[in-house]
Amino acid sequence: MSNLKVLNQASGQGWSIYNGDSVEVIKGIPSDSVGLSVFSPPFSNLYVYSSSQRDMGNSTDDDEFFEHYEYLIPELYRVTKPGRLMCVHCKDIVQYAGTSGKAGLRDFPGDLIRAHQKYGWMLHSKVTIWKSPVREMQRTKAHGLLYKQLRRDSSFSRQGLAEYVLVFRKWPEEGQEVEPIVHTESSFPLDQWQEWASPVWETTDGEEANASFVMESLPVWMNVQQTNVLNVQQARDSEDEKHICPLQIDLIERCVKLWSNPGDVVFSPFGGIGSEPVTSVNCDRKAVAIELKPQYFEIMKRNLEATNRQILLFGNG
């Protein structure tokens, strides 16, 4: 890769990572080379990860965020192989009366869909990730989830917030060769597909009651552990205004296994501490990731080096 705006870089068995602004560094990735992208973009101005002006999370509003993000979208399209997919993790964003005048929800997933479609991406699938409303209430103390609010005036009561994986396809142009993603009955049994084809995937948090409720009421992907994430405590520092929110390992693994071939390049433009590249390497894929913040880059590097050591000792799980 070209060293265009690369501040630091590292590589190992099956992975290469770069420290820099993804909008600039991605220009060094060859066209039609990425088999799958999996990432969680900054949620507009919801999470702030650093004081850098290049941090998309430092946007003052949605317009500023999308102005910055839309420099990245066409580059993601360019580097993706014809006929292949991109998985974008997102959720609706809460608007608070104190900052926006009226409390409510912003349709951030819908805005992302429209932004990607402007640059040729076609929405292929949308997965709803079930989240525990009890856990959300305990973590956020959102008054709309409180039982006392329901008794006082339920016009302010709302459901808990799900998350989503938006899956986009880069349709090939006429004459372009398309490499299929192939599975076998032994590597991907029918009953597994019938489960994974569900439009709702469940995350569990160890509370048996929550898991039991979902099992009885919804056809879901089971056993996506909400707390199965890379350790983020070591990555926090005084500049972090909000906590980082890595994707669950189980969720990434299922996207990678379903929508890429072994040996494919799996790309993340927001590498963080390495959730997507670590999972991709563990799934016998090649990982490429970009991360703006130097501290997160170093944590990602250590996590990937530890993954290589583990695979050397025990093989891919």
Image (tube, helix red, strand yellow):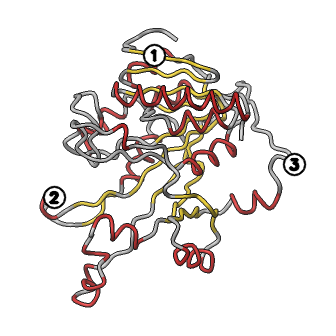
Residue 120 left/right relative to 32: left
Q: At label 3, which amino acid type do we have?
A: Ser
> Is 262 or 56 nearer to us in this picture?
262
Q: Residue visible at 49% across and 56% down?
A: 227
Badge 1 crowding class, 10 Å Cα cut-off, few under 14, some 14 to 19, many 20 or more, is some
Mark 3 vs mark 2: give the one in front.
3
Q: Residue visible at 65% across and 63% down?
A: 198
Disc nearer the start of the sequence (3/2)? 2
Badge 2 crowding class, 10 Å Cα cut-off, few under 14, some 14 to 19, many 20 or more, is few
Mark 1 vs mark 2: give the one in front.
1
- Would you name the residue on which mark 3 appears? 186
Which residue is situated farthest in the front direction here?
Answer: 313
Q: Residue visible at 26% across and 34% down?
A: 50
How far apart are labels 1 and 2 at the CA level?
A: 40 Å
Q: Residue visible at 62% across and 27% down?
A: 308
> Is 194 or 262 nearer to us in this picture?
262
Q: Position of residue 48 (x, y in %)?
A: 26, 41
- Would you name the residue on which mark 2 appears? 100
Residue 162 left/right relative to 127: left
Q: Position of residue 6 (x, y in %)?
A: 40, 14
How far apart are labels 3 and 2 at the CA level?
A: 53 Å
- Would you name the residue on which mark 1 appears? 9
SS at badge 2: helix
Mark 3 vs mark 1: give the one in front.
1
Residue 62 left/right relative to 175: left
